[in-house]
Amino acid sequence: MLADLLGGARYLLIGLRLLWRPRVRTFVVIPLAISAAVFTGGIWLAWHWIGALTEQMMQHVPQWMAWLRYLVWPLFTLIALVLVFFGFNLIANLAGAPFNGWLAEAVETHLTGSTQTPPMTWRQLPAEIGAILRAELRKLLYIALWSIPLLLLLFIPVLGPALWFLWGAWTFACNYADYPMGNHGLKFPEQRRMLAGRRALAMGFGIASLLLTLVPVLNFLAMPASVAGMTALYLAELRAATPAETHTEP
């Protein structure tokens, strides 16, 4: 199990290195810009939301209880960070989904030597965007249905944050697996089953991806690096288990 956890994390490092390969880096610019814009906007909104909500709440508190400010602010900050953290991942992936699919194709072409991956063209985007958004919404629904009850556990010391961390790692693995696996015709339920078959490997990758989003500046690389790393993981570890009826050449 430990070997798989470490092996999964190693694929994120592979993904970071792949971003600078000649065939790949062209497809990194747009996902990188989307990540930076969403994260910066999320932090700005969270900061203003915390300040406004705290001030509004303290207006209804007697002066002698003003010390509550020092409890309310950290609590709201924790909630805002959780929302920004998961919102950043979900919104960035939703906005970057079409480009992440092309990035996964470019990485696969680089790793396998295939020349059959179609070049990126803007004309493809309108035709594909409907199917891509439906797939992303299915992922969002799955994550939301599990996140709502887990959110209630967040306030349980130690256990709540630990469960959220593990759940976050799993959602990261599921999110990024969709791009290389979706390119091979696998639907989201099939992707989850394949990941569950190598759960420790998937969790190792998800934990590494999640932690990368917490590192200032480097977090902007988290989305494209995770797409590239999961593509490498899929090709090396999971592709052989792809059902024959859904497997297609890139």
Image: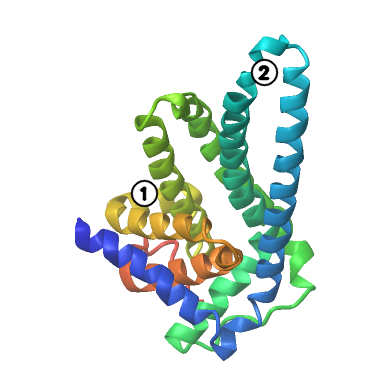
- Do the residues under discs 2 and 1 have CB atoms within 8 angstroms? no
Residue 193 shows in the view? yes
- Comparing 123 with 216, the one in front is 216
- Furthest residue toward front: 64
Q: Give the image location of residue 145, x and y in percent.
A: 53, 31
**Amino acid at circle 2:** Ala
Q: Earlier in the sequence, mark 2 or mark 1?
A: 2
**Disc number for residue 31:** none
Where residue 241 appears, as percent x and y from the top left, is 31, 63
| Lateral position of residue 127 relative to residue 180, left or right | right
Instruction: Please name the residue shown 59% across and 41% down the image.
Output: 81
* Badge number at residue 193: 1
Q: Identify the residue position indicated by label 2 in the image.
A: 66
Q: Quadrant of the N terminus?
A: bottom left
Q: Nearer the viewer, residue 114 or 215?
A: 215
SS of the residue under disc 2: helix
Q: Residues within 10 Å of mark 1 (few under 14, many from 20)?
A: few
Q: Quadrant of residue 119?
A: bottom right
Front: mark 2 or 1: 2
CA distance for labels 2 and 1 = 51 Å
